Image (spheres, rainbow, N blue to C red):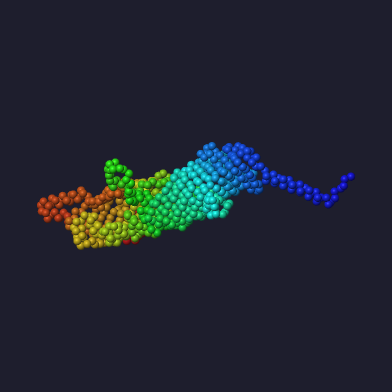
């Protein structure tokens, strides 16, 4: 009969079991450590190739270190691209070492915390239909098949990136410094095209390229890039290179025209002269922030801050920028006017003696046919590509050839293709212009509405270059209220309807100017001898009704102590032509006067002014006939008896003010 187990024998049994399990585990570890993984290269190569439908091969050696995160080392890696790609390999490298997490792999997700490549050739290509060479599935448009890579280490090698939708075809060469002791051991040089513009870049970066937002420690980077005629220099750090997240850098940006940034970066900015800007650039989430902006656009300075929020389907640009000094010539591209002509470049002599081509016939442009109103068309696509809420102000405006502007500000709002400039405020000739302009590009052609109020403008400052207005002290007010349709300012004004009115109350005006308008020879001679003097302006008013671009006069009158001038006629905003008649009626007796209506005609580019030749010829004929009888009687035809009477200024100004519907012209202007 076998002996019965005693209580003391149980621990011995358990120790034996534990020893056996430990021996098995030790044997398993030894097997795993010394397992000939190279035996699995063939099966692994075939399995991966079959699963992805493209060739994968580890050509020389394979080793694996197991754990919660498995580390795989492969010497000689060739991973082909899909057949539709232009480059043969997604990755071809001397060696590749990567960490892979097992748990996500069980549910079909590839998570690679780290990849280290030695002398790789990387071919990345993305098609407009969503296909990507780096999607690890037969269906390369499946975004779920894109592996997650947290950090990438590259020791030399190159990367090719192609994306037809971005107009990108870029080749980048990398090199790692032999003694990688600094913060920027990896250098790169890129060439190719971006947005179908010639592109080049070079710089340095940290040895580990962080591609995941989960790695919070940012890595340093330096960039010197040129795309088309735009160049960028930046130095700072990036937390996530794949999404360009966590950017914190200083930048220097310069180019030919800020408008070109739309093609390169998708930011809608106005057309400008050549610019140079610097500042700080940061990105948090989907928001780019450019702060401490300082620089120049043409001859104007610019400073401020802008944010570009890409979190919504339509990005939003917000901010505030200002200029201490604005050169008005720099606004020409913004409002669609031609830029001021610069010096003519000197051409190099390329022809030999005797081979010079015959000089081309010089053709002077027909000034009368030249258009003045801007004909540059709106880019409706750009107006709908971005929303905006930006305030711009200029403390001092210089070099204005048409109007003496001295300062200004505008609040720009762009929402869903509707552009709103409100409020607009400008200082002009001692007064102000304020109002709003709205353009809705959601209809074709675009709808245009403008409401501008002119207040307190001093006549002597409005035309500073005209000597005869130096001593004029009257103040002017006015209003423009127009609506039209078109895709350029010329079209909008040429189809506009509404009202335009200008008023001037009591003041002083140069008499020599009025006498010249009336062709009063005796008065001109008198004032040239005795000097010009001021006469009292009792009132002045001009009001026009606008229909389909044709301005028809309602009231044109100017009443002084010397002369009453009444006018009538039309101004065509569509054809840019003038057809006005001014009839002066002097209040005093004047000798040597051949007064006749003054006709103003021509075009905006080449206006003309002169007496009504028919009326003037009639009076001249009478003078010649009387001169046959007695030369002294000829002077009788030139004597004015002064039939002009004082106009009822209060009634005139009230009528002119009322002619603009809903007028907000201040009462002080008609007193």
Image quarter where the N terminus lies is top right
Q: Is residue 553 visible?
A: yes
Q: Position of residue 446 (x, y in %)?
A: 41, 46
101 on left or right of 505? right
Q: Position of residue 218 (x, y in %)?
A: 55, 54
Q: Position of residue 655 (x, y in %)?
A: 32, 55
Q: Is residue 650 visible?
A: no
Image quarter where the C terminus lies is bottom left
- Image quadrant of residue 91? top right
131 on left or right of 293? right
168 on left or right of 560? right
Front-most of 558 and 50?
50
Residue at 30 percent of width and 57 percent of height: 463
Front-most of 37 and 432?
37
Front-most of 209 and 156?
156
Q: How many marks?
A: 0
- Image quadrant of residue 303? bottom left
User: Looking at the picture, does residue 248 appear above or below residue 443?
Assistant: below
Front-most of 53 and 652?
53
- Which residue is at the far right? 1
Residue at 12 percent of width and 54 percent of height: 633
Q: Position of residue 540 (x, y in %)?
A: 29, 57
- Which residue is at the far front? 178
Residue at 78 percent of width and 48 percent of height: 16
């Amino acid at each position: 009969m076998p002996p019965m187990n005693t209580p003391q024998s149980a621990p011995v049994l358990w120790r034996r079991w534990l020893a056996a399990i430990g021996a098995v585990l030790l044997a398993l570890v030894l097997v795993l450590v010394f397992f000939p993984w190279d035996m699995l290269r063939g099966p692994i190569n075939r399995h991966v190739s079959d699963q992805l439908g493209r060739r994968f091969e580890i050509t020389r050696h394979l080793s694996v270190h197991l754990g919660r995160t498995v580390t795989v080392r492969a010497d000689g890696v060739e991973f082909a691209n899909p057949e539709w790609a232009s480059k043969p390999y997604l990755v071809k490298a001397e060696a590749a070492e990567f960490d892979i997490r097992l748990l996500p792999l069980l549910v079909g997700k590839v998570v690679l915390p780290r990849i280290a490549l030695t002398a790789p050739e990387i071919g990345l290509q993305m098609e407009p239909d969503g296909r990507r060479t780096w999607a690890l599935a037969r269906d390369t448009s499946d975004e779920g098949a894109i592996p997650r890579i947290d950090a990438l280490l590259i020791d030399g090698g190159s990367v090719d990136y192609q994306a037809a939708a971005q107009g990108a075809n870029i080749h980048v060469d990398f090199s790692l410094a032999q003694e990688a002791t600094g913060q920027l051991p990896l250098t790169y040089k890129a060439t190719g095209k971006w947005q179908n513009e010639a592109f080049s870049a070079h710089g340095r970066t940290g040895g580990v390229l962080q591609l995941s937002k989960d790695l919070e420690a940012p890595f340093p980077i330096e960039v010197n890039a040129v795309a088309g005629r735009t160049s960028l220099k930046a130095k700072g750090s990036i937390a996530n290179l794949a999404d360009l997240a966590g950017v914190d850098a200083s930048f220097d940006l310069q180019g030919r025209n800020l408008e070109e940034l739309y093609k390169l970066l998708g930011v809608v900015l106005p057309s400008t002269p050549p610019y140079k800007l610097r500042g700080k650039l940061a990105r948090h989430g989907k928001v780019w922030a450019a702060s401490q902006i300082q620089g120049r656009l043409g001859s104007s300075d610019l400073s401020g801050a802008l944010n570009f929020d890409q979190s919504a389907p339509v990005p939003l640009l917000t901010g505030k920028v200002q200029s201490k000094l604005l050169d008005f010539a720099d606004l020409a591209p913004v409002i669609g006017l031609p830029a001021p002509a610069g010096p003519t470049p000197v051409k190099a002599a390329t022809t030999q003696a005797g081979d010079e081509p015959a000089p081309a016939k010089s053709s002077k442009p027909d000034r009368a046919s030249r258009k003045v109103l801007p004909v540059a068309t709106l880019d409706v696509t750009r107006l709908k590509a971005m929303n905006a809420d930006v305030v711009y102000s200029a403390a001092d405006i210089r070099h204005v050839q048409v109007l003496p502007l001295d300062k200004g500000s505008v609040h720009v709002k762009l929402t869903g293709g509707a552009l709103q400039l409100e409020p607009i405020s400008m200082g002009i000739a001692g007064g102000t212009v304020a109002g709003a302009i709205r353009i809705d590009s959601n209809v074709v052609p675009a709808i245009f509405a403008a409401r501008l109020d002119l207040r307190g403008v001093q006549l002597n400052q409005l035309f500073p270059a005209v000597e005869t207005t130096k001593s004029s002290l009257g103040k002017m007010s006015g209003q423009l209220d127009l609506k039209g349709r078109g895709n350029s300012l010329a079209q909008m004004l040429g189809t506009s309807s509404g009202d335009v009115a200008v008023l001037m109350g009591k003041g002083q005006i140069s008499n020599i100017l009025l006498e010249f308008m009336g062709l009063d020879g005796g008065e001109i001679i008198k004032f040239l001898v005795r000097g010009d003097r001021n006469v009292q302006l009792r009132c002045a008013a001009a009001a026009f009704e606008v229909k389909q671009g044709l301005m028809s006069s309602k009231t044109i009158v100017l009443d002084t102590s010397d002369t009453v001038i009444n006018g009538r006629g039309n101004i065509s905003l569509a054809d840019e032509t003038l057809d006005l008649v001014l009839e002066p009626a002097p209040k005093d007796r004047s000798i040597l006067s051949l007064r006749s209506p003054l006709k103003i005609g021509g075009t905006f580019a080449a206006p003309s002014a002169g007496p009504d030749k028919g009326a003037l010829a009639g009076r001249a004929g009478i003078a010649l006939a009387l001169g046959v009888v007695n030369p002294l009687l000829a002077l009788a035809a030139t004597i004015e008896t002064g039939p002009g009477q004082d106009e009822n200024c209060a009634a005139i100004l009230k009528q002119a003010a009322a002619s603009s519907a809903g007028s907000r012209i201040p009462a002080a202007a008609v007193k």
